[in-house]
Image (cartoon, rainbow, N blue to C red):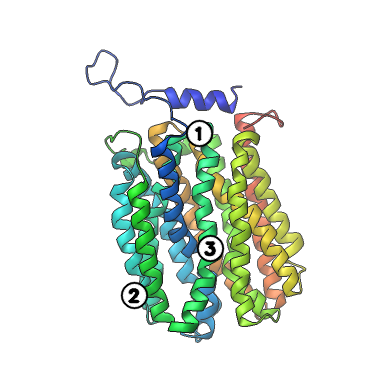
Amino acid sequence: MSTTQDIEKSVASAPDSGASTPSTPLTPPPLPPPPEGGRAAWLTVFGGFCAAFVQFGLANAFGVFQGYYETHQLAAYSPSTISWIGAVQQFILFFGGLFTGRLFDAYGAQALLIPGSVLFVLSLMMTSQYYQFMLAQGLLFGLGSAMVFHPVVAVPSQWFLRRRALATSIVVAGSGLGGTLWPIALKRLIDEIGFAWALRTAGFIALALLSLGAACIRTRLPRRKAQPYTGLLRPLKEAHFALLALGISLASWGMFMPFFFITTHAAALGASSNMAFYTLAILNAGSTLGRLFAGVGDRLGRLNTIVGGSLLTGVLLLVFWIPLDSVPALIVFGVLFGFVAGSIISLVPPSVAQMSEPHEIGARVGLTYAILAFFTLSGPPINGALLSAGGGGRRGYQYAGVFSGVVVIAGAGLLLAARLRINKQLWAVV
């Protein structure tokens, strides 16, 4: 069976299967291989880093809002009900890839980044009652995020092949750094200038960084006619792609639980309000390192690395999260869990890209995230319900750890099956 490098080289040089025959004068010339660097390529990576710092960084900081809402504006609502705001946000963010990935392949990054940035900034400045939190922070934030996130994580694969995991990991590390700094900044802003102006300030910062990102990001491949919607699900006929998409989705079903509930868990263990807020920053600091570390996937194999990261993530949930009974133990868990979970987050786009033709990368990455969206929609409310079933105490967090750990390990099994479909040699670089 072909190695991953052989698959990628053939994919990168293959003409569009839907193009005209050689006798037709409109046949496009073969695309040159990715340049693997250069001014435009690295500016694109930098722009993606800035956009990810804002978009996914704030999405990763939802645990701050979860903990704040439970004791302030939405104290009358259960943790499960409040978590639906973040769940809807994540669902639209990921499910939107079914449409934005296709549009990215056809029209390039700016066509999505500019309107998405406007919607994203507006969403930060429009919250009051629960239904307004849901409309602004759930629906509008999710829609703007979808239009920013998908081109940002897909475009590095147009510029890099051999160093694809490295380039993507740098971009996605921006989200980890944002997830580290945003909780600290939001806590300080809320304490000093109040909740409303804290979000407005965040909106102005987001506007500046998203504008910088849109100015730097460049689409390398030529514009082309958008794929018909009838062909969007065609990649699922490929067994290795279907296994990869479902494996990533199952892993994500449980993987995001600590991002939502580590602050409330810290409070339940007796942490001060300040320390509880900082646990999410600590988790995201570990995630930043893990997202950068994911660049080793270029050497060890992207699928090999994502399988190992998923397995370790599940083990940490089952072996570490369930028995922990102190704030220091939770902090250590946050660093370790963030590191391994961050590697998974970085490796999703390059893992999908190595199974895709260049002009289909956006659509296939978007399809993968669209499938994942249904799992991220239900994951936080399920875990919130498990917390309630445990009376809001330690037992509820143990229930959530069991559920999340089991589904993540099941996802790792499907990812391993996808990897073995490509190459059955266990020590091969895949």
- Is 251 situated above or below 330? above
Asked if the residue at tag 3 contacts the one at tag 1, i.e. Cβ–Cβ closer than 8 Å, the answer is no
Disc 3 target residue: 179
Q: Residue furthest left?
A: 25
Tag 3: residue type? Gly
Q: From the viewer's perspective, is 428 left or right of 8?
A: right
Q: Secondary structure at mark 3?
A: helix
Disc 2 target residue: 126
Q: From the viewer's perspective, is 266 left or right of 326?
A: left
- Is 106 situated above or below 90? above
Q: Residue furthest front?
A: 39
Cα separation, mark 3 vs mark 2, equals 21 Å
In this view, the residue in front, 22 or 42, is 42
The answer to whether residue 194 shows anywhere in this view is no
Query: Which circle marks residue 355 in the picture?
Result: 1
Tag 2: residue type? Met
Binning the other alpha carbons within 10 Å of mark 1 as few (below 14), some (14 to 19) or many (20 upward) gives: many
Q: Picture quarter containing residue 88?
A: bottom left
Q: Residue at x 41, y 49 (%)?
A: 47
The answer to whether residue 138 shows anywhere in this view is yes
